[in-house]
Image: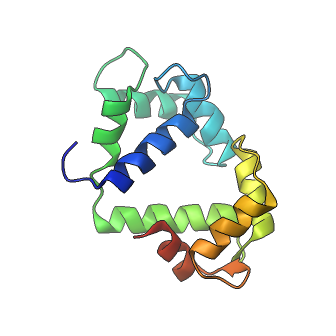
Amino acid sequence: MSGLTEYEKREFQSGFKLLDKDKDDALTFDDLKQQMTALKFGFTDQQIIDLVFVATGSQDGQIKYDQFQARFVHKDQGELEQEINKAFEIIAEDNEKISKHHLRDFFLSIGQATTDEELDEIMGMAGTNGKLSKDEFVKMLHI
């Protein structure tokens, strides 16, 4: 897809792979349900089915990488800010800052074990002193 930097393309691929729990190169209802539940989005089964349909425009029930990228790459600034705020709230667990402990819990909730070194690297990306404010979180995301 044109208009994306190589970094952005890698980030989309990483996000897709993270969601694709069964590693079949397609996001299915089961993949998305597992992640939506872990992220505490509270989506109904029908909402997840609708999400797959919106992303694909078909009833095959599978989102391929190119469909995923095409659907989610075009965000207006307001929509992006809402998503960032929601992500921050989920990870920070309603606190004002994200701690290393919050990050570890978040990664575990989506099935990703992380080492202390990896968590330190993430925290260091934003130049933080051990806790991420919302501004530092945004900076870390390069937005």
Coloring scheme used: rainbow
Q: Nearer the viewer, residue 34 or 100?
A: 100
Q: Is residue 93 visible?
A: no
Q: Residue 129, image x and y in percent?
A: 71, 85
- How far across and down, in percent of the image, does residue 85 sit? 52, 68
- Residue 3 in the image: x percent, y percent? 20, 53
Residue at left 55%, top 79%?
136
Q: Nearer the viewer, residue 115 or 22?
A: 115
Residue placed at 64% from the left, 75% from the top? 124
Q: Position of residue 76 (x, y in %)?
A: 27, 62
**Does 23 sit left or right of 6 as displayed?**
right
Horizontal side of residue 46 vs 70, given as left or right: right
Q: Residue at x 44, y 65 (%)?
A: 82
Q: How many marks?
A: 0
Please say if 137 is above or below 33. Answer: below
| Residue at the farthest top position | 60
- Looking at the rendered image, the quarter that the N terminus falls into is top left
Can you see residue 12?
Answer: yes
86 shown above or below 114: below
- Taking depth in this image into account, of 22 and 85 the one nearest to the observer is 22
Horizontal side, residue 103 vs residue 6: left or right: right
The single residue placed furthest to the bottom in the displayed view is 129
* Residue at 66% across, 49% down: 40
**Quadrant assignment for the C terminus:** bottom left
